[in-house]
Structures are given as structure tokens and as C-alpha cells.
Image (cartoon, rainbow, N blue to C red):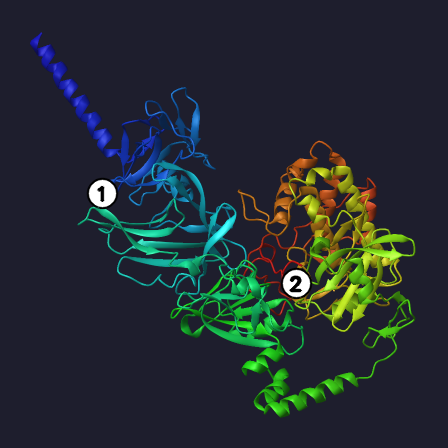
Amino acid sequence: MRQTMKAFMVLYFLCCAFSIFVISTAIDTIVATQSIRNGETIVSSGGNFELGFFSPSNSNSCYIGIWYKKISTKTVVWVANRDTPLNPTSGALKLVDQGILVLKDGANNTIWSSNSSGSATNPIAQLLDTGNFIVKDGKENNAENILWQSFDHPADTFLPGMKYGFNLVTGLNLVLTSWKSADDPSRSDYTNQLDPNGLPQFLLRKGPTVVYRTGPWNGLHFTGMPNLQPNTIYTYEYVSNPEETYYTYQLINDSVVSRMVLTPDGKLQRFIWIDRTQSWSVYLTAQVDNCDRYASCGAYGSCNINNSPACECLTGFVPKFPHDWNGGDWLHGCVPKTPLDCGGGEGFLKHSGIKLPDTRNSLYNRSMDLIECKNMCLKNCNCTACASLDITGGGSGCILWFGELIDIREYTEYGQDIYIRMAASELAAYGSLKRKKQVRIIVISVLSCGMALLGLCLLIYVLKKKPKRKGNILYSPEGQKQDITEGSENDDLELPLFGFAIIASATDNFSVTNVLGKGGFGEVYKGILKEGQENKEIAVKRLSVYSRQGLHEFKNEVYSIAKLQHHNLVKLLGCCIQEEERMLIYEYMPNKSLDSFIFDPNRSILVDWSKRFHIINGIARGLLYLHQDSRLRIIHRDLKAGNILLDYEMNPKISDFGMARIFGGDQTEAKTSRVVGTHGYMPPEYAIDGIFSVKSDVYSFGVLVLEIVSGKRNRGFYHPDHNLNLLGHAWRLYKEDRHSELIDKSVNESCNPTEVLRSIHVGLLCVQQCPKYRPTMSTVVLMLSSETELPEPKEPGFLTGRYFSDVDSSPIMQEGYSTNGLTITLLDAR
């Protein structure tokens, strides 16, 4: 009996020892047969991090998280179920056979899961010494196959070795989201993310509102973080290639503990653990002072924390609203003293020590030098500034800005040079004109005031004496004539010329209560025009003194549309030209523009599928008339939702012909160095090489069709599963036979599946990369109105909104990137 007891004790001891040995050798892993319950943890092999259940101070909720093991203050760096806490007495973290981590509550309900994209026959979950919790295939020949990792799904903490950015292949885009409070790890409104639009930069948001941005990487640091400098604590690196773009850092000394955190009060801070005080110390804060508040001085305003007041307009600009500006309200920003006149001798004024403006509406190229960059900017009427992409080694690369320059600040050191486009007259005033085309103005600027005035008078005299050929004559009701063309030899256009007093009276002296909208031309007013005993509603488009458009666009619109008559084109009733005033008078469209309906969550329900399909067909017929059936062949060049007006019966009417071009005879295409249009609607061949044709409008129509179907804008489209724009998303759904997922939810109940799928198919045919594959508008009208079999579409142009294209035929802006993965959109939205 004693021998039996001894044998039993020996066996029991050996079993216990074996169990302890197994546990000690597997302390950092979980296999499919194991789980972690409250009170149990796993620890990384080097003892740096621990994973298990925890409850924050002053909280009864329980979470699965990772925290530092070796420091006295429990500091959590990652939380799995941050928005779905557990009861502290229940719950278990398990690894199921497919390689998915699952967190169950006491009732066996799934609270959280890792949702691994792959599967494994022998999965293992392991906590690494970096703080990364991974799931991989445990097979010996596939040991490094990571199926899922916590580094791809951060909470509020950016740890060493983490790739903080986005991956264009997988569609992954990391986001830091702060805790709601020190005791509540659930997601707050503060997020920080590397924004992929234009030149990437980190944006800190509160909800949808940007509150801070780092600026883009300039080769040394982010332009808005000059305090990011080489140091003895960590090294850092910014990586950008066709597959991924990210920022990362590594600690120099393993004994140092440091982390980057988005705090509950919305600050991006780096902390260092100090052993002597047993506490965390703030090493760096991204937001330094009030000048780091996003757009604190508005457009073209610059913030300098050493000045009082801190905000001032950039050289060559004046406050948009002087009264507000002088009262300390700077958010409306500044406007140019002299509006740009494309081709009028503009140049650049250099500003040094600058945090570069918001780059979301920018393009960039790594191979250009600064001279090429400036020349490229001057070729595009909507380019407002340029700068070197990388400031190391004397500078290289090119950044181009389009539209207003926002969120600029000045630094005493570590800032960067930017070249802001200025009117020739402003450059002359500051002695900054350098290009050969402005030699005359340079000479004038260095002469005495008397000589300058004399030269200006001579120039004005020469311009006034410039001979004019017969052209388009406007006739007023009193029989007055006014020629508005430059060298046109076409037949006269008899168009009413309204007096300024008549239009001012019709619009109640241009009252703000009558403003219908605002675009690149200026403001549009509603008016009541008295015609005998009747009143007629009109829309008056008034050219703003600050408009980027000018007399060229005004004349172009008058001539393009004056003799066009079609049910789906807006009707031009007349115009007004008096001194500096230029106005166009249209028939009034009570339902305003299409974008005010389809992109508005509240109003989109007013446009059911039958109305949307009616609008699609109406736009198609209007374009067909312009391209083929009218007396002129007209290329619109700015077709977009904002330029489709809706009458009382929701009939679509194409408007805004300021950018249109007229083709004569058998002309089918043309090339221009003056690229015009709107982000997201321009086809690749036009945006890159300036080549336009009727197929340019077809491309824009295709974008518009997909927007009408989906209720989403092409530019600015966001999907959590990828970084594609709307075209790329629609193409992806088409290839996967998931067309129905593109449909706007507000028309789900009213939609005709056959019409919707045909519209999507036609839209994709219209946005194909190569113009020759796109159908003509006559074919489009036929395809929409019949049940003919449609050809298979090829891949669209501009699937994403990231970089310049590298089309082989383009002599400009070439990168070693895929054409369809990139975007050139050369104009700000009007």
C-alpha cells in the first residue's frame, strides 16, 4: 500500500512538473485548445508586455487589453473590445480553429473577434515583445504567415515598430482614436490618421472637423512639426512607395520606454517613462500653440505666434471681410488684391519659413526640379502655389496646390519655402517678377513713378487702339450695340443687353436674401423681371471682382449658349455689361442644382429612382444635342452635378458654359495648355496632356451617372474596406457581380433593378481609361433607352485619388506608378 502511495505521489509530481514546464514554455501564446479568462494573462517572451483582462480605475467594466509589464503604473496600449465591455465575472478569449480570436461573454455571445482574412490549420496567437499581438499559422513551413495583428488595429497608442499609415494593396488605413476619458477606453470623437488625398499628411479630427494637421513630409520632418528632430531616444522614418505610405519609429535604447498617444483631450503627445519618478513625462506635443489650430487665419492668412495679432494676410492679399478681420475674426481669411488672369504674366512670390498649406488639393511628383515645377504650375490656370517636395540636398520634387491655400503658419526656423502665384501687377510692386514674359513689367517696376505711369498709359492706349473685327453684337432694348468678341468672324448674335439698373431692381439691389448659390464665376441671384404687366423669374450670374474667371469665360458662355435651344439646356435670356459689371441672365430654375439633392441625406429621398433615371436620360440628350445635333459642336468641359439645374418638374438642364469649346467642321479633338474642369470629373487624357474631345464629356457623364445611382461624390468618396474612389468602388463591385451594393439606400424601394444595372454598366463604359473605347453620346442614348446587349467595360481611368499619372504619352508629371491607380485633378471645385 505504501509503495502504491509513493508511486502515485511520484506520478502526481511528474504531471505537475510537466504542466508547469508546458505553461512556462508557452506563456506568450494561445493555441486553439486554450483560452484566457479573467485573472489569467500571457506575457511576451522578453517580459515587456502582458495581455489579459483589465478594468480601468473607477470602472466596473472589463476589457481585453495589452499593457506594459515592467513598469509600476499600469498603462494600457491596446484594447480589443473598447466599445463593448464585459462583466468582470465572465468572459473568455479563445482562438478558434480557423485562426480567429473570439471574445465571449458569460452567455457565450461573441463580444469581439479579430476577423482574420485568412485561415490556418494550426493557428497560434502570440504576444510579441514589441506589444504586437499576432495570429499566425503554426505550421513549420508557414511560421511567419501572419493572419492578423493588433498593430493593424491600434487603439489610442502608436508603438515602436508600428507602420502608421495606409496600404494601397490591402486597403488598410490605420486610425488612432482616443479614449473618452482616463477611465473609459471607448472611442471618442478625436481621431488621427494619415490622409491619402493629395500629398499625404496626418489629420487630427474631432468628428468630421479637422482641428490639427502635421503637414506633409519634407524629407526631414513633417512641415507642421519642426520639433520633430533627431534625438537620443528614437529614430524615425517616413516610407512612401506605390504599395504603402507610413511613418514609423524605433527606440535606440531597449531600456527606454516611450509611446505616442492621442489623449482624451485631443492632443497628440509622446511620453517617456522616467524610472526615477516612476511616472510618464511628456517628451513632445504635436500641437505647440494657438497657431497650430487648423485654418486659424483662414484662406491665404498666415499665423505667427510671435506677432500681435497672430494673423496677417500673405503679401499680395487683403482681408475678405475687413471689418471682421480687424475685430479679430480671421476665419474668413484673405483674398488676392489683384485676381489672377491666366496667361496675363503671372509669376511667383517666395515665402520662407512656412508650414506648407493643406495638401489635400495638391498634386506631387518626385522627379521634377523646382524650375519644372513652376513651369507646370503656370501652365494650369488653377494652380495657386508650388514648392519642393523634399528639402534635403538642396531640394527636389514638386508639389502643386489648386484652390485656396489654407492653414499656413510661420516659423522662426525649420520652416520651408513656398512659391505663391501672383498677378503680374503685384509682382511688379514687390520686385519679384523673374520670368521672360514679364520683362516689360520688371523694367517698369525699376523706373521712376513718372515713367511707370507713362508706360502704363501707353500700354492702355495700345490696348484700346487694338483693331476689332466684326463679331457678336449684343442689342439692348434701346438699340445700343456692344461688341463682346475678340476676332470672331461668325454671324451676329442678337441677344438682349439689360441695363444695370434693371437687374439691380430685379434682384432688390443684389440682396443677400436673393442669393441662390455661389461658384467660381461669382454669386447667382434670384430676380423678378417686370415685362409689361407680368413678372418673370430670372437667375442672375454676377461676375465677382475676385473671380478666377474673367472676360474670356464670360464671352465664351455668351457665344456658346446664345443660339442653343434644347429642352435640356438652360436658356440664356440676356446679359449686362456696364463698366466693371458683367452679368448673365438665365431662366430661373426653382429646384437649383442636382448636387443639392443627390448628395444631401435629407433631400435625396425626394429624388426617387424614376426621377433619377429621367435626369440621367435628360442629361444624355442634352449632351447629344451639344455634340451632334446643334449648329455647333460644343464640348462642355465642366459637366458635373453642380452644373445640372432642375426646373419645376425636375427636368435636368445643363448650365455653365464658361469653359466650353466650340469645334468646327470635322474637328474631333484639340489640345490646350489651359486645363479647366473640376476635381473628379476630368478624364485622364485631358487632365494629363490637355487633350479634349467629345469623349471628355462622355467621361464626365459616366462619373455623373455613377454619382446619381450611388448618391456619393466621386471625389471624397470613402469606404472602410479600401482606398478607391467611387469609380474604383463601382468597378470593384461590377467585377464581383455586386452591382446592387452601389445603389443609394434612399432609392432601394423605388428602384427598377434592370434600369439601375444598365445605368451602372453604361456609366462604367463611359469612364473607361482609353477614350476610343468610350461610347459616343448617340450610342449612350440608345443604350439607356433600349435593351440591346452592352459590351463589357474595361478598367476605368483614375481609380483612386493619390498621385500623378505616368501615362507614357504624357510629357509631364511622370512617376513610376500605375496609371489607373493615380489621379490628376487640376482644378478646385467651382
Disc 1: which residue: 71
Disc 2: which residue: 687
Can see residue 98? Answer: no
In the picture, measured across the screen, residue 638 lies left or right of residue 253, that is right
In the picture, measured across the screen, residue 10 lies left or right of residue 251, that is left
Of residues 147 and 661, the one drawn nearer to the viewer in this rendering? 661
**Residue located 19% across and 22% down the image:** 15
Q: Residue 651 in the image: x percent, y percent? A: 81, 46
In the displayed structure, 443 sits above or below 410; it is below
Q: Which of marks 1 and 2 is in front?
A: 1
**Residue located 50% across and 61% down the image:** 328
The quarter of the image holding the C terminus is bottom right
Of residues 690 and 565, the one drawn nearer to the viewer in this rendering? 565
Q: Residue 752 in the image: x percent, y percent? A: 75, 34
- The answer to which image quadrant residue 105 occupies is top left
Measured in 3D between alpha carbons, the distance from the residue under mark 1 to the one under mark 2, in whole angstroms, is 56 Å
In the displayed structure, 271 sits above or below 365; it is above
In the picture, measured across the screen, residue 52 lies left or right of residue 112, that is left
Of residues 505 and 454, the one drawn nearer to the viewer in this rendering? 505
Q: What element carries label 1?
A: loop
Q: Is mark 2 on a helix, strand or loop?
A: helix
**Residue located 60% across and 67% down the image:** 383
Q: In terms of sequence position, does the residue under pointer 1 or pointer 2 come before the other?
A: 1
Can see residue 171? Answer: yes
